[in-house]
Image: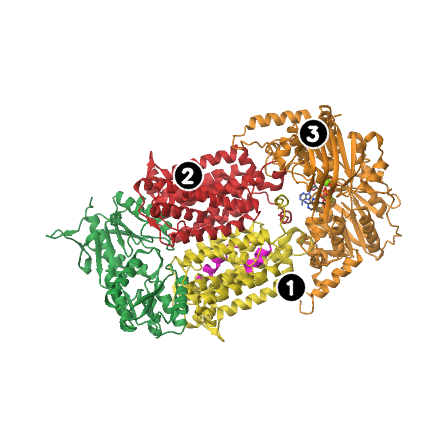
Chain colours: A red, B yellow, C green, D orange
Amino acid sequence: MRNMKKIELILLGIMVLVIVIMSFLSKAFLNISTLFQILQLSAELGIMSIPMTLIMITGGIDLSITSTLALTGVIMGYLWKFWGMNIWLAVILAIIVSGIAGLFNGFLVSKLRIPALLATLGTWAAYAGLAVGIDRGKGVSGFPQSFLNLGEGSFVGIPYSLLIWAIIAVIFYIIVSKTSFGMYLFAIGNNEKGTFYSGIPVQKIEMTIYILAGLLAGLAGVIYTSRTATATSSAFSSGALNVVAASVLGGTDVKGGSGSVLGTVLGVLIIALIDAGLTLANIQATVQEIVVGTILISSIIFYEYVGKSKVKTIQTISK
Amino acid sequence: MRNMKKIELILLGIMVLVIVIMSFLSKAFLNISTLFQILQLSAELGIMSIPMTLIMITGGIDLSITSTLALTGVIMGYLWKFWGMNIWLAVILAIIVSGIAGLFNGFLVSKLRIPALLATLGTWAAYAGLAVGIDRGKGVSGFPQSFLNLGEGSFVGIPYSLLIWAIIAVIFYIIVSKTSFGMYLFAIGNNEKGTFYSGIPVQKIEMTIYILAGLLAGLAGVIYTSRTATATSSAFSSGALNVVAASVLGGTDVKGGSGSVLGTVLGVLIIALIDAGLTLANIQATVQEIVVGTILISSIIFYEYVGKSKVKTIQTISK
Amino acid sequence: STTNSASPITIYMVPKFTGAPYFTACEQGALQAVAELNELGLPVKFYYMGPSTANTEDEIKTITSIIALHPDALLYSSNDAQALIPVLKQAMAAGIKVVGFDSDVADPAARDLFINQVDFNVLARTLIDLVAQNVGPDAGIAILSADPNAANQNAWIAAMKEYMAQSYPKMHIVTIQYGGDLPGPSYQDAQTIINAYYPQAKAIVAITSVAFPMAAQAVLDAGLSGKLYVVGLATPNDMKKYFQAGVVKQDVLWNPVDLGYLALYAANDLVRGMMISNINGTEYIGGGKLGFYKVGPNNVVLLGKPFIFTAQNVNQFNF
Amino acid sequence: MDEILRTEKLSKSFPGVQALKNVDFQLKKGEVHALVGQNGAGKSTLVKILAGVYKPDSGNIFLDGKKVEIKDPNYAISLGISTVHQSLIIFPDLTVLENMFIDNYSSSSIKLINWKNFRNQALKIMNEVGINIPLDQEAKNISAPMQKLLQILRSLLKQGKILILDEPTAALTSDETKILFENIKKLKNKGISIIYISHLLEEIFELADTVTVFRNGEVVMTDSISNLNLGSIVKAMIGRELQTFYPRRDPKIGSINLKVENINSGILRSFSMELKKGEVLGIAGILGSGRTTLANTLFGITPATDGSIFLNNKKINIKAPSDAVKEGIVLIPEDRQREGLILQQSIKFNISLPNVDLIKNKNGFLDPKKGSDLTNKAIKDFEIQPPFPDFQVLHLSGGNQQKIVISKWLVRDASIIIMDEPTQGIDVGSKAQIYTWINKFVEEGRSVIFISSDFDELVNMCDRIIVLRKGVVAGELKKPNLSIDELIALSTLEERDDSFAVKSFVGESRND
Ligand SMILES: Nc1ncnc2c1ncn2[C@@H]1O[C@H](COP(=O)(O)OP(=O)(O)OP(=O)(O)O)[C@@H](O)[C@H]1O
Ligand SMILES: Nc1ncnc2c1ncn2[C@@H]1O[C@H](COP(=O)(O)OP(=O)(O)OP(=O)(O)O)[C@@H](O)[C@H]1O
Ligand SMILES: [Mg+2]
Ligand SMILES: [Mg+2]
């Protein structure tokens, strides 16, 4: 396992550095409500990256969550607009559907034992197809203000979506680091067979995290819909790989067995702050992409190579 | 190991079926030059999916190739337009750069032993960032006719890009199925350590295929630029997962050790024909996404579950 | 609140995406206006910033960051008629004057002014009249649009249908394809039209600046120059090649340089309170060298009539 | 004594193997019941069924007289059956403490873990048992014997009614074995029933009350230890009296073939040796003494960091296995399945893989016919069963798998073959065949480096034996002064352990 404590500290250091540099580049940066406004835009990414981290700790991956996000929004919108359903009932039903989408992933991965990359590659295409099929590219808007408040409103100055992200992060932080469920995730990522031999219901646990990923992608879909006041199948087109990238930047190991919720949250925050900071400093979007790409690749090399003790190539060839 | 012969036959059957159904749905479908026109649009996907198949046979993956494609186009365009370089010299230099991009992937994967998914996730972001950074989102157009001929022209009625794809497919078909190099790919995918113990230079082989992937992505980038008459960093935005999906549909196993060039070619053709056929038959694009998604997920389940002898879950849990 | 005329003001211009020659032309116009205003002792600090691809989320992020900088005015061209409404309302609430250009949002309350490049009814009529003149009053036409959510394009399509029913009852729309404002897909859609709908469709009407050159290229590639009529909207620089090749006879557009110029003047007028009211209560804005413009219902300002570029006049323009 | 567990006509088969056939087995309260049998006899399969890992094809299990269906490992644990599996089950990235409590599964897995409580429990049990492992180390950083002890501790913590130990001592040194035995006796006195599996028959005589012998998936004998002796158990295990089976050879030792001077690599410290033509050179040592490191260094898996290697007086540079193969040096690796074979592929694929130079046609393409010819020759020469080139290696028996590893190298003209534990987990007949090939190989003037933990085998097969201890040469024995006692003395300074003698005809434990 990587030394996550150390990685978390490094990430914290990077974040502080980013904030310091950015606040030199632009005065606007240090304003709390500005920061909240900016971070709010990463709430969906932040929320989805948490179950992604759990899944990656077990050695899995879920490429389908951004399709689930779009699917949830579209279903919600259609239930409300064309079936005349109460908006909150539509929200609940749509989130249930997202849970079923997660369940299906879990079924493919834990019961049929299809490699997660493969299984969720398939459902990524299938759920996206479904969303486009329902939506027919048209989109729904005109939601009632009560629903839009979710994306617009705030509590003691903190936007709801940030609050929701924070609450989820705290809950999952506790689950991952303080409960046996969390320990099992690491155990599965380390040695799935051994975990099973130890009497731990591996399949049930895997199933659970894929369902959680579906549900949280659904929740993210609802927040996204509310924030943009539109439900469309092209929602969150930036895609699942960005969610994976945020977790990876946060120190999660794609091979499984390592990762932390705190690291992932910091990973998302760093990307968001750099993005926003460069815009605030009037630096072109094009430069931003280069900066983020470079940070990602260097952190990967750092975690994989320098972060571990340097070992002979040949030993690691055994995978 | 999957029975690739059988999978290839099934795919061939599906392709014939698709052609028959589609020609009932639309008369335009059976016209040879129409077919060529349609298939030409899949040439880049087809070209890139071949090295992807080789990499996946060894148990790796390359998510960065679509970024490499865009990067190559942009570099070529800029060398030509702003440095006043001869267009063909620019093409060659850009393809060399794409080879270097592949080399860097190979270095990360085979020397630093960073898992391929992780390494190429990083370079995916980095190369895309680089492309956007050079391009600044502006794009280059107005290429000379001699260059555009590559994307427009044809030889005895067969578009050049299709010819190039076909030639590459034949060469790689021979490499994979008739040479020791091909044999080593399967051996690495099945058991990398055991292959190394058999006196085979595993790292060199891995390095080679990532370089090949880079070079062919570069070639695809040149063809794409010529065909669309524009070099832009947003080229081929449909992404690497589609390339992976085409290989998977063609029977390549993401776990490594299985796959065939013929299967992959058939996979690409089937997707292209369905896409085009449904469009020709006036069926909504939305339905197309559903159809392709469904085919993908069912083929995955078929290959992984039904295609192999049905084994008790418990045995396969040991991975 | 208005600002003292002599003190400098800050204006941000956010295009759908940076890089398209069309938006670069808008930027040129805005820069001309800035230069004039500075000379007049009305200093303006001007920034041009936007996403690198036509991505709604990135546009929202950019605008959110800009709000934090508290500029005096914001010019936008929206990627999504719905999703930008909340963030634009935020900008207005923050005391920023919001002026749309080129592409509006669905809710007039989300901005102070919208500079409409051209009356969409007039534009639609111009296009249909050109088809009638060149192909005949009973032509079947294929439309190549951006994506199904694009507000402008949808309005034009609706107006075309209405005008056809009125003036050319035998003229009909054979198919509408959506190329997503991307060169590759637009080209592919054009090929689809050629393969599947020609000769039922005798004209392609390409109503985005990306789609038109791609449609022309596809017709050229298919050897249908002179047989399949292509008309549409694009910047003259993009079309010069096709005028030369003879595949395109007319290009309909407004002058995007003027559009950017007027949008900037409008923003300046709003910020400095330089709007002129006339006796009847109708508001006018000062458009510099372009003169005065009436503010119509829903706070829409109409730039003018469409302009038709032809092989004879196209070389007088450079944007 | 009362019965606690009984199986009735338990059967289990895997594709191509009947692992258990109508097994009737009875365990009494408070007894230590030993299971013995050759490799593949079915011992671990029974263990895995009792532990809930496998479901039996047919038959019943009774616990305290009640019929039970052990559907998964969790259920087995809840029934009071705790198991130390033969394979090392460890979570390398988790700490020792986390490893110890990993299987503390309860339905309320979302409840917060009380680490303080766990730590106290861990300290208490380690104190009781008499061992000490640093609790906050990551498990991968402790030694292999400690890892095994950790696994044993984990099952002791559960305080079940039945404890199953499947070859627990295979990875332990004698000190730890002693501690384990004391604890087993303590548990027995507390009334806990123990199923104990080992290939070391002295252990059986020290611990067991009852012995059950398995052969080919069947129970062939169950009896009280007092009625048995070593000979009767061995006879039941292999179905006949054991005879010697080492083929005779008249060594014709020639000039120096390979010379190694002062190499350092891994644990090996300035190691030097000479190897002559026509010689079988044995390498002896205990677990972790550096034998595998030596083999891997000479074959280029872990190249030497300094020193020199000469082949026929010419200095050679071996940086990777491909270099070694070019020089005619080949290796039969220790881990047959992971290092020696591509299990998913056919016999033909495996034989061809290192020999593509032999099966190419003029144009450089692989010639399927040449490949088949080469494979058929290997199948014939080495009597591989079944003799089908397209047969998947995964489904071959262990002995036949080993034959493929050996034959894939012997079909080419190697001049030096290094064999690392070549007879490990191999049945008696196949062993004799391997010995015959070794003799034939050196008779042609070539050389063998023979690494084995089976000192009997070394003494009988080698012309000379180098003994390693902690990476340095502890001594060298030459024919005719080869003796097991001397080897043991040299490799373990502290003590003599007669268990090696028994090991020699039962075969070493196999990791699965
Ligand atoms: N999962 C499995 N799949 C296929 N065959 C298996 C499996 N597990 C065991 N076998 C086979 O069942 C037979 C019995 O194996 P088992 O592991 O029970 O033997 P054992 O007596 O424990 O041997 P050892 O002394 O080597 O540990 C062997 O032939 C083995 O190859
Ligand atoms: N590549 C390596 N790097 C570091 N340490 C190693 C390496 N290979 C082996 N070791 C360690 O060196 C010691 C010698 O190991 P080696 O495998 O050579 O011993 P061995 O005599 O073959 O024992 P065994 O019976 O385990 O095969 C062990 O403690 C092992 O953990
Ligand atoms: Mg066993
Ligand atoms: Mg060894």
Q: Position of residue B285 (x, y in %)?
A: 41, 59
- At label 3, the amino acid type is Gly
Mark 1 sits on what residue? B179
Q: Quadrant of ligand 3?
A: top right
Nearer to us in this view, B221 or A291: B221
Q: CA distance from mark 3 to mark 1?
A: 63 Å
Quadrant for residue B1, please give it. bottom right
Judged by its main secondary structure, the magenta piece is: helix
Three-letter code for the amino acid on which mark 2 is drawn = Trp
- Per the image, label 3 sits on a secondary structure element best described as loop
Which is in the foreground here, disc 3 or disc 1? 3
On screen, residue B184 above or below D455: below
Q: Which residue is mark 2?
A: A165
Residue highlighted by disc 3 = D65
Q: Left or right: D331 with respect to D142? A: right
Residue sitting nearer the eye, D251 or B183 = B183
Q: Which residues are magenta?
A: B51-73
Q: Measured from the top left, where is residue B306 in percent x and y?
A: 59, 52
Q: Is residue C123 left or right of residue B62?
A: left
Q: Position of residue B196 (x, y in %)?
A: 66, 53
Q: CA distance from mark 3 to mark 2?
A: 54 Å
Mark 2 close to ligand 2, CB under 8 Å: no
Q: The numbered mark 2 sits on a residue in which chain?
A: A
Crowd band around label 2 with a 10 angstrom C-alpha radius: few (<14), some (14–19), many (20+): many
